[in-house]
Amino acid sequence: MDCEISIGCGCYCGGFGGEKHKKQFADSIHRQRAHPAKAKASPNDDAELPVIIYTANKIYTMNPMQPEATAIAVQGDRIFAVGSQATIVAGLTARQQSYEIKTDYQNCFIYPGLIEPHCHASMEAMYYKFYYVGLSDRSKYVDGELVNMSGFDSKQGVLDYLQGITETTNDDPVCAWGYDPILLPSDPDPNLYASDLDFDGSKKVIVMNMSGHIAYVNHAALTEFGYTSETDIEGVVKGPDGEPTGELQELAAMAPLLTYFDVSLTDLEEGLRSFAAVASAKGVTTLTDLGFGSVNNAWDALYTVTQDVNYPVKVNCYMLNDVYDMIGGVDAFRALKQFENPKLKLGGVKIVSDGSIQGFTGLMRWPYYYSRRDKGMANITSLNLDRTLHELVANDILCAIHTNGDGSIQMVLDSIERVTRFTPDRDPRFRLEHCQTPCLDHLERMKRYHINADFFANHIYYWGNVHRLKTIGPDRVQYMNPFATAKQLGITFGLHSDAPITAIDPLFMVQNAVLRQAKEGNVIGQDQCIPVYDALKTVTKDAAYLLREERLKGTLEFGKLADMAILNQDIFAVAQNQISNIHVRATILNGRVIDHGSA
């Protein structure tokens, strides 16, 4: 029976494409009903499939009942056995079952496939054709070749680059991403203003802040959006003269931008393939799209690329709450969920409760920020948060909630307490995303209500000293992203890159949780460092738990999916500051090998 998608009332539904966006979701569902993916029988039901045994120097299973092994057997897309070559072969011989022994990786170290529990796959795809203006170098694949995107260390360098693009291309708007003025302290005024971007009076220029919570636009764009001195929208920043400066903060103010981010399906698919290739080369077998739905045509693009047998990762989507409301809530969510495939899952809903700390839009409690009296911004009211959480819990839909500032953490915990009084028997697998500034009381409440955390470890490396000097101060920053305290309290937590905010790289995240070293070299919060094993759990076993996929992945055990990361060095033996330099020799996804070559 066909399901009609009716529009709900999201806070910013107009900004997410309105009727056009709603129609695209409906069109996606109707197209996929007309051309459904072919049903695939489980390879494990076919006794004729051969068993392939992979030998290794050592296999770390992350299963405490069998922590190490030297051989692992795969049949189809599942793990058949874990042990030694001798014991596995003996069992197969007794069963008169054929097998093949692969020694390609006998000198390597095998781990469960690495899981990135919070990144933005469709945003990465949207940015694929945008111009990069961040500080650190990034990379992407173009026509199968890895291309370096050089960073910029000054505002003027960015402006010169964008002016050249504006003058030499037909792009309108000119869209760029990655700028963060707070990382350019040597510039006297690193903020971008509309007048800075007025290279060609007729062309619109849009620059996304690295956080994704702020944008900078020129006067042509302000005029197009209808933003003037009379505009009364929170987040449309105005100067002393009362006119918009060109800086737009958070969802309400940035809503018109998404009309201009209508990337073609072909470009999205190309961007998704590039991102997957980059992720796979870092050992990732499962990644996420946390905030899915804000990029038009994303489901169609994801659905297409994940049906390719050679697509090297699985994608787990969490739909942005405003999009969830706009397309019709639970009924539309379930309608779209029917069209999952083995590499594509619609896992839950993501709520954005506040902004970014380095952008001073993260919602903070009194006395607010260290160097400013800003309170930050809430992107949802307590009433709407209660309503949404109640609906998600009642319908068994997983929920991830963006919480950066301690004010948003407290608001969300209060809401969860109110909602779960009426649904104590449910397992909503609540996740506080980023969760960067909790106090001890917050963590204890999280433990009491079985609320998980997903910490942003890379923030310590890239923005640690910014937080120390400007946002939360030298004292509070010591327990920002409190890995060790969460571990002591028994809170399950993952680590994430928030890509494209920072580059996807689980081994780099592990290293940052172990060392807590800023890019300038100083350690921030030594007491919150955790051992390598615990850090590795956050991107394997515990990350799978956050996604409610612990029965299928996260550890290497018989019956689970054959998803593995094969490294050329032992993560437990190398110097801790060299963990991120370990080469990923190969990954195995659903039993298929993706070889990345020797270092």
Image (cartoon, rainbow, N blue to C red):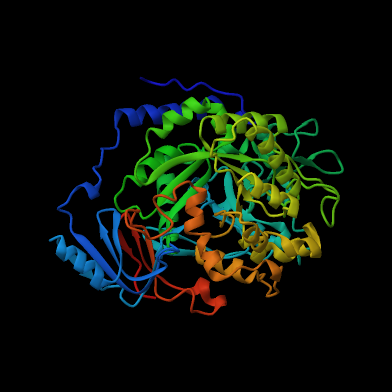
As drawn, is 355 to the left or to the right of 553? right
Image position, residue 459 (x, y; %)? 65, 60
Q: Is residue 294 left or right of residue 406?
A: left
Q: How many numbered discs?
A: 0
Residue 162, by quadrant, is bottom right
Q: Could you tell me residue 599's position as x and y percent?
A: 39, 76
Q: Is residue 521 visible?
A: yes
411 with respect to 351 (left or right): right
Instruction: Say above or below: 253 vs 184.
Output: above
Which quarter of the figure has residue 64? bottom left
Q: Is 356 or 539 nearer to us in this picture?
A: 539
Observer-nearest residue: 255 or 216?
Answer: 255
Q: Taking 355 as reference, is 258 above or below it? A: above
Q: Is residue 172 left or right of residue 415?
A: left
Residue pictured at 29% horizontal, 50% vertical? 309
Nearer-the-camera pick, 575 or 134: 575
For the question of whether residue 149 can be seen, the reply is: no
Quadrant in which the N terminus is drawn: top left
Q: Give me the residue at 14% from left, 53% from top.
A: 48
Residue 242 picture location, percent across and down:
84, 38
Q: Position of residue 45 (x, y in %)?
A: 21, 47
Please tell me which residue is depicted at 54% across the width and 23% down the height of the picture. Answer: 7
What residue is drawn where x is 40% and y is 46%?
269
Image vertical order of residue 184 relative to residue 367, above or below = below
